[in-house]
Amino acid sequence: MSADFKRAESHGCPMSTCAAPAGSPCRTGKSKVAIQYHTARFRLVPQLAKAPNVPTPGVRKPGSAWTELPRPVRVGAEPVGHVSLGYARASTAR
């Protein structure tokens, strides 16, 4: 079995209609497992950038109801804590 699907799944899918997290196959608009990974996703992997398509392997059950699979564990990743984001704007016109 080719490891291409593992390379593609190492990134989350950037397609807004899919948004599959890392470790899970792409999904269709009808919440089924896609037959092949979205092009935007496998183009993030340099080894697959020129591939015409990357099919979803049988172990991912293409065409079945999509469910999120366990996310891969990142080596050395620890929970960091809370993050505060903010936005401020100051007018320069007086």
Image (tube, rainbow, N blue to C red):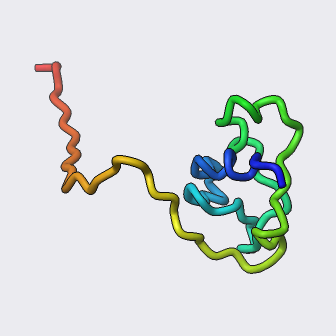
Q: Is 20 placed above or below 39 here? A: below
**At which x and y percent is residue 2?**
82, 50
| Residue under the point 69% across and 61% down | 25
Residue drawn at x 56%, y 55% as measured from the top left: 22
- Counting from the top left corner in percent of width and height, residue 73 is at 45, 57
Q: Horizontally, is 16 left or right of 72 in the view? A: right
Residue drawn at x 84%, y 55% as measured from the top left = 1
**Numbered marks: total:** 0
Q: Is 82 placed left or right of 55 in the picture?
A: left
Q: Relative to the observer, which residue lies in front, 92 or 7?
A: 7
- Residue 29 located left or right of residue 55: left
Residue at the spot 51% in from the left edge and 58% down from the top edge: 72
Residue 38 placed where, x, y %?
75, 50
Quarter where residue 91 is shown: top left
79 or 44: nearer the eye?
A: 79
Quadrant where the image shows the C terminus: top left
Q: Is residue 42 above or below residue 64?
A: above
Q: Is 53 drawn above or below residue 60 in the view shown?
A: above
Q: Residue furthest left?
A: 94
